[in-house]
Each structure stands twice: as structure tokens, then as C-alpha cells.
Amino acid sequence: MGFFSAIKKIFGGEPGEAAPGTVAPEGSGPVAPAPAAPAVAPQGGASETAPESASATEAVASSASPAVAAQETALTLRLREAEPRLSVWLGIVLEGVEETGEALRQRLLFLLRALDAPEAEAQAFVRDFEGWLARMDYRLVEEFRSELQYRLALALDLEDEEDERNRLFVKISEGLSRTREQLARGLDTLFAGHGELDEAFWEELEELFIMADLGYEPALELVERLKERARKEKITQSEGVRELLKAELEDIFRAPRRIAAVNPPEVVLMIGVNGVGKTTTIAKLAHRERMQGKKVMIAAADTFRAAAIEQLQVWAERVGALFYARQAGSDPAAVAYEAVERAVKEGVDVLFVDTAGRLQTKVNLMEELAKIRQVLGKKHPGAPHRSILVIDATTGQNALSQVKLFKEAAGVDELILTKLDGTAKGGVAIAVAMQHHLPITYVGLGEKLEDLRPFNGADYARALLEAPSSSAPVGR
Ligand SMILES: Nc1nc2c(ncn2[C@@H]2O[C@H](COP(=O)(O)OP(=O)(O)OP(=O)(O)O)[C@@H](O)[C@H]2O)c(=O)[nH]1
Ligand SMILES: [Mg+2]
């Protein structure tokens, strides 16, 4: 979309300009420095902006009634003065709008035009969003404000914007609070009790890691890594270990992502034990792809329960994806096969294949997954391009054996950690990433479509070790 770069310029604020206490984006540098006032801000006639940049709102104003035009002029001025942040601008534009309807539509179009969005794209965005609101039966802005911001961030390629990252960090921090309290308090006590790094210190650190849900072997391994790091970096005092740990965790989470050449459709196989969030996560991933303009199909290769098929169909409708299923009890591999065939025929970009989390026995499940894989690859070379194992972050050590089992039987390319909004057991992610060298690509932070975000190892490490700053989180 043509207006991305212009918008990125407006919202991609310099890290240095961050409001005090907010989280500066890391490695997500802005495309260009943010101008003091938005360079393409709309202009309602009452300011000194160059005439050529005024076209957008003039067009709005000329087609609107005098009252609306006056209101838009006022809004324009407010935007120009406001901090260039998506949540701030959205807040201004939505002021006084409480529910769906014509006013909401006009304000959204106003915002998009103000950002120099081509008219057709602005209209398409609003139309798509209104369709979704209707399907979801949402009426009040408060019910969908967050989703709207998420959609704008995705459509405008602004997910790295400080606001969005801050929102994510705060949410992860909440989910990890239990683990963090344990770790942070334990580390404090440990540092207070030991000055020099000695064997007793390392032993206590190991115990602390075990308590934080890492499990015995990973705790041992992590301590060994830290010892090695301390030796290399010539750290001799216990206080230095906090930074070492943060750096080590970041390394652990930096597992390489396998990049597969994809001849569309890209086939994504979703696997995991029952109840971890496979189906919900497919919906969330499909939603992201849809928001980025992709044609998506979802296939119900979990044929074990009729309710599972219905649940998936409802999600497919909500996100605007094609859906492929047969009746309950059908052969899952046959469903997968036919779905690929259909996806190729329909020119689908991404096909998600949902699978069962439970069959009569584990052996059955693993055999079935192996068969699905085989059939997919036979029908479409390279498929499945991504095999995603979903793990529930509130399950403790069991996650490790799940990864092992699925890796051996079905193959796993990446992990998605769900339910980080709950009382997550934060240490499990460390153990899994460390022992299996698999990238964690996304985290689930709730039950809604927007509650899925790219995983960031540095943020995660920080959320495990540091209490969130007292500054008010932006845009929550
Ligand atoms: N709080 C929270 N709940 C989640 C998250 N992801 C999924 N859930 C919930 O977890 C429950 C199970 O999710 P499903 O997507 O049905 O799980 P599944 O793996 O497909 O389950 P089976 O099909 O039975 O194997 C549902 O109530 C979801 O709403 C998350 O990130 N956070
Ligand atoms: Mg399911």
C-alpha cells in the first residue's frame, strides 16, 4: 500500500523522543526521524502548511457539511499538535464517538485521509472493518478499540511502533509476574548473601532456576552457561550475574528461523496436545495474514469432534478465510489432501491445517500427524512449510516432553507459546528454547483475535527479570 512509508515517517518516532519512562523500541529504528509536526498532517485552512499538502482534508471538507468541516478542521489542528503515536491519534479521532455507525466511519476515513491514504485503500479498510464488526456483533467502541488499533498497526506496518511494543511488554510482564517475583526476589537474596562468585552461589542459583519452572536439567545447563560467560567476561562478583543472565536469555531466544522457499500456497500445520490453543491460534494467525492482504484458507483436519469443526468454521468466517472441512469422523489426512488441492485451485496464499490434540492414544495421534505430513508433501512439494507446535505457557515441565514427543514424531519448525496472559510459568520458555533450539515465533496473550504478537526474546528476558516501569502503559 502506497501510504505506508509516509505513515511510518509520522509514527516512527525516534527512540530518544520516547516519553519519560516508556520503553524505547530496540532494533526497530524509525525509517526517518519524526518531524516536530506531522509532515503530511491534514490541513484545514487555519495553519501555515504548504498548500500542496492540504489536498487530503480539503477534499474531506468540501464534501462534508459546514459543521462536519469545522469539526474536522479542529481535529486536524489537534492531530498536528499531538504526539505522533498511533494510540494518541486514534484517541483524538475517536473522541465523542461511542458506537458503530456513520460517525465512526467518517472519523476513520478522516484519519486515513489525513494520513494521505489513497481513497480506495481507506474505503477498503473501513469496509472490511465494518464487516468484521457486524460479524462479531460489536457495537461499542470500547469493545473493539484495541482491535482497531491492532488492525491499523498491521495495515500500516507499525507493529514495531513504541506504543505497540509497550502494550505487548506490559501484557507479557503481567503474565510473567509470578515467575518474575520468584526470580527477582531470589536473585536479590542471592546477591545480598554472596559477594564473590563461588560454588555455593552457583548451587543456589541452580535451585532458584528450578523453582522458576526451568526444570532440573535446563537449570543445570543454564548455570553452566552462566559460569562460562562469567569466566570469559571476567565477572567475579555476584551482582554482575544479573546482566549476564539477561544477555544469556537473549541468546537462548535467538534460535534461527528456518526459511523455506514457498511455492504458494504456504501450508502451515498446527500441532499440539489438546486444549493448548491450536484452533484459536490458527484464527489469530489467519487474521494477521488477512490484515496483510493475503488470501487464507483454514482446513479442519481435526475431525475427532464435530464441535471442533464448528468452532473452526466460526473463526474462519470471523476472519474472512475460506474454510475446508468434511464431516466428523472423516480421515484427517484425506481432509488435508483435499484442502491443499482446493487451496491451489483457489489461488490461496496461506493454508492453515488444524489438527486434533487428542485421539484414543498418543500413538494414534503421532501416526496420524505423520500421515498428514506425508500426504501434504505428496500433494504439494515442500508442504508443510511450517509445522508449528503450540504450547500452553501455564503448563510447567510437561511442555518439555511435549516438544520432544512432537519433534520426534511429527517434526516441529517453530513454537508458539499461548496463555502468557494467565499465570504463565515463565521458565518453561527458557527451558524449551535452550534444549530444543527452536524459535518461538509468537506469543498468545488472550482469547481475542488481536491477542497474538511476535515474540521478542529481549523483551521476554526483560519481562522475566525487571518489574515493569511505573509509567502508565500507553494505549491499553
Ligand atoms: N487466556 C488465554 N486463553 C487462550 C489463549 N489461546 C487459547 N486460549 C483459550 O484456550 C482454550 C482452548 O483453546 P483451543 O484453541 O480450542 O485449543 P485447541 O488446542 O485447539 O484444543 P483442542 O482442539 O481441544 O485440542 C479456549 O478457551 C481458548 O479461548 C491465550 O493466549 N490466552
Ligand atoms: Mg482445536
Image (cartoon, rainbow, N blue to C red):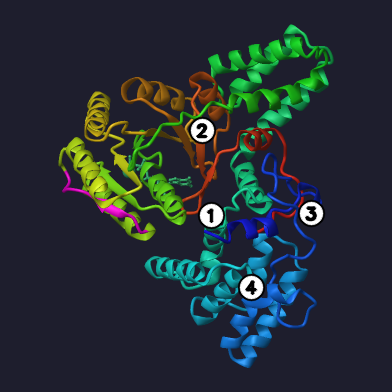
Q: CA distance from mark 1 to mark 2?
A: 20 Å
Helix, strand or loop for disc 3 = loop
Tag 2 residue: 440
Indicate whether 115 appears above or below 292.
below
Mark nearest the camera among 1 and 2 is 1
Identify the mark nearer the N-term, 1 or 2: 1
Residue 327 is a magenta residue: yes
Q: CA distance from mark 4 to mark 3?
A: 21 Å
Q: CA distance from mark 4 to mark 2?
A: 36 Å
Report if the beta carbon of the residue with label 1 is closer than 8 angstroms to ligand 1: no
> For the magenta stretch, what is the residue range?
320-328
* Residue 93 disc label: 4
* Residue 19 disc label: 3
Indicate whether 355 appears above or below 373.
below
Helix, strand or loop for disc 1 = helix
Helix, strand or loop for disc 4 = helix
Disc 2 marks a residue whose amino acid type is: Ile
Tag 1 residue: 154
Name the foreground residue: 419 vs 330: 330
Disc 1 marks a residue whose amino acid type is: Leu
Identify the mark nearer the N-term, 4 or 2: 4
Q: Residue 44: horizontal and vertical position, in percent?
A: 70, 81
Disc 4 marks a residue whose amino acid type is: Val
